[in-house]
Image: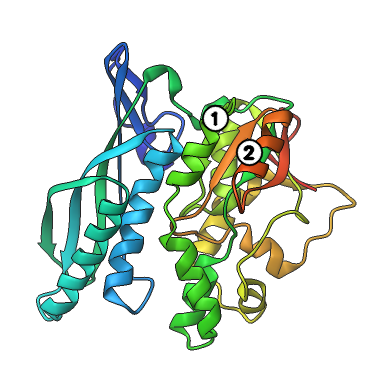
Amino acid sequence: MDQALAGVPRWPDENVLIGFDTADDAGVYKLTPELALVQTVDFFTPIVDDPYTFGAIAAANSLSDVYAMGGRPISALAILAWPAKEDVGDLQQILAGGADKMHEAGCSILGGHSVADEEIKFGYAVTGTIHPARVKPNAGALPGDALVFTKRLGTGVISTALKRGMAADEHVAESIRQMLELNRRAAEAMLGFEVHGCTDVTGFGLIGHAREMALASGVTLEIDTRAVRFLPGALEYAARGALPGGLKNNFDFASCDVEKSDKTFVSRETESLFYDPQTSGGLLISLPENDAAGLTAALEGAYRLGRVTARAGKAIHLL
């Protein structure tokens, strides 16, 4: 995709505050000096068995990019690919799950578009609003900042373990609970502090999205491998080989920008989870040290996982 985008023409528009130049989570377009639109789109294939739950997770995942920019989602358009042979009752449940999650977010569904396809795919294009001066881009991380993360890793590995019949019910249930959790509470909490940069950790995994933040900001992100938290069962399933195809793709793409110190030891399964593609993952937030302490105290489940330094060597440094 990077190679393809490199050949796409760019036309200047002073109202485009965030485009695709920095691989940010959403685009931002200024309408007035006090109002801008935040726009994003996301869809994927089923990752859980229950259709209602799949629809709700797809909605939470689509909303996440707006929250990552500091915006408030207001409207959405559904995107659906549906095989003619599938049960219409399942489709109704997918749409109902998505609608209920959008309602929870205070986001109105205005319509959508569907196509016939052999593989089920579902998601939303979401529009939000934000004050132009309050946008939280991935390009704002500053040397000296702390890095705070708001969720645990492992949804991709657990979903793969489920498909292979390896996953315990309680591990699947906890992964689903986290994927269903909107990032609204985290976004509202971070706006009470001096946040310099933010991104949500989704399909490219922790390393992939941290790399984008580091490259866009011209800094190095140091990640404390001992501080990263994982969903119950994730390390076990990674050790047993339940690794999604997207994990290997993420490693092949992003690992060239990662370095470890001579004293850093990371087990194979732990390191693999840093590249695990997440669904409805947490927010990775860059902010001053004092504000990081306040945010982790104010937001249950948020924790420090590293810091930002001046660019030295590669984009990501594992400690």
Near-viewer residue (214 or 172): 172
Identify the residue shown where x is 53% and y is 27%: 139
Mark 2 vs 1, N-terminal side: 1
The disc label shown at residue 45, or none: none
Label 2, residues with CA under 10 Å away: few <14, some 14-19, many ≥20: many
Near-viewer residue (71 or 203): 71
Label 1, residues with CA under 10 Å away: few <14, some 14-19, many ≥20: few
Most distant residue in the front direction: 298
For numbered disc 2, what is the local secondary structure? helix
The disc label shown at residue 295, or none: 2
For numbered disc 1, what is the local secondary structure? loop
In the rendered image, is residue 118 in sight?
no
User: Hey, what amino acid is under mark 2?
Assistant: Leu
**Rendered image coloring scheme:** rainbow
Identify the residue shown where x is 83% and y is 59%: 265
Q: Quadrant of residue 232?
A: bottom right
Q: Is residue 200 left or right of residue 255?
A: left
What separation in Å lies between label 2 and label 1 (alpha carbons)? 8 Å
| Position of 242 relative to 185 (above/below) | below
Residue 254: x and y in percent read 58, 49
Q: Tell me the residue that label 1 is attached to.
A: 192
Residue 114: x and y in percent read 12, 59
